[in-house]
Amino acid sequence: MAAFKDKKNGSWFVMVRYDDWQGKHRQKCKRGFQTKREALEWERNFLLKVSGDMEMRFDDFVKVYIEDCKTRLKETTWLTKEHIIRTKILPYFGNRRISEIQAKDVIAWQNELLRHRDAKEQPYSETYLKSVHNQLSCIFNHAVRFYDLPNNPAARAGSIGMKNAKEMDFWTKAEYLHFAEAMMDKPTSFYAFEMLYWCGLRLGEMLALTPSDFNFEKRTVTVSKSYQRIKGRDVITDPKTKKSNRTISMPQFLCDEIQDYLRMCYQAEPDERIFQITKSYLHHEMDRGAKEAGVKRIRIHDLRHSHVSLLIEMGFSALAIADRVGHESIEITYRYAHLFPSRQTEMAEKLEFERSDENVSEKS
């Protein structure tokens, strides 16, 4: 290991020779260090990084983690992960050697997250705490699986938060119809909410719809993409999961409504998005419509919950509902069952009837 002084400006630089992942000999020059010590420290960390040595700093391993994982993820997914890493993880663990981080260090970090309060004295939500901890654990798991870190200190420390802490909210059909009536003065808003409620679409799926996605003879709409607005760019991606690629049967009244709307779109191209609106716009419309209709304000995503809840109330099976809304597993659909305690009462009454009927048969 050696560092050299630049005679022109007095700064220090290093010339590093190493073998890349293909075994080829490489050389890298890094300039601009104020001291020899800084130059040698950078050289040491660089060599640890390219060798995958767990004596490297945590922030250097994060760079390795990014190189290994980023191209495998959707851009929207990566942006969420990157924000958590940059704002919640690196400030605490960044300059530590990854091999030296222990479960007690993770617990201390967790306690800081649990003590956090925003300007309104509100803590992080349980679901957010879970997401942040899971991201740290993912980084350590990557080091364990591929770079021979002995163990995952985040797993040993135990998790915080809850995956599904937020109670599901929904509108009944009557509440939605009151809301929809208030939306009729703005056709684009009305038809967008109709697709969300009656088909159970995710917001990104609805915003990605084009005329070619509809087959009005078969009364279907095909979900094959999702829309996101990322850093001022319109981005079309695959849907959330493989099961999200699906064809949904539409009621006739909804087919009629969407055909009316398409006639209003002035001959939209087959692959042109029909809902040229933003998520922010729909949030404002939800505020307006809920207020005018006199119904509780729910989230836009809760319209999807409302659709599933309606199908459960109508008696459809969890498997059929999962196929319609693109749930990856019917276990997700089962989470909605608690929304209808009246179903439990109905079950008990039917069981009572069956028992009474059997008693009558035995006596006769």
Image (tube, rainbow, N blue to C red):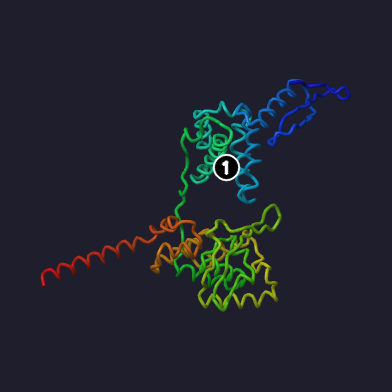
Image quarter (top left, top right, bottom left or bottom right) of the N terminus: top right
Total number of numbered labels? Answer: 1
The residue where tag 1 is placed is 119
Identify the amino acid type marked 1.
Answer: Ala
Q: Position of residue 329 (x, y in %)?
A: 46, 56
Q: Relative to the observer, which residue lies in front, 181 or 357?
A: 357
Side (left or right) of 35 relative to 69: right
Q: Quadrant location of residue 67?
A: top right
Q: Nearer the viewer, residue 239 or 117?
A: 239
Q: Is residue 252 found left or right of 280 in the rendered image?
A: left
| Image location (x, y in percent) of residue 229 | 66, 56
Position of residue 18 in the picture relative to residue 114 (left or right): right
What is the secondary structure assignment of the residue under circle 1?
Answer: loop
Q: For the point 22% across and 65% down, which residue is it?
A: 352
Farthest right residue? 8
Q: Quadrant of the C terminus?
A: bottom left
Which residue is more in the foreground, 333 or 222?
222
Circle 1 crowding by C-alpha within 10 Å: few under 14, some 14–19, many from 20: few
Kindly indicate the quadrant of the structure image that contains residue 44: top right
Please give left or right for residue 17 compared with residue 299 in the image: right
Residue depicted at 54% across the width and 34% down the height: 144
- Residue at 55%, 68% (x, y): give it: 195
Q: Relative to residue 171, is residue 27 depicted above or below? A: above
Depth check: 301 or 38 in front? 38
Where is residue 187 drawn, in percent x and y?
61, 73
Q: Is residue 331 above or below residue 346?
A: above
Residue sitting farthest toward the left? 363
Q: Which residue sits furthest front?
A: 23
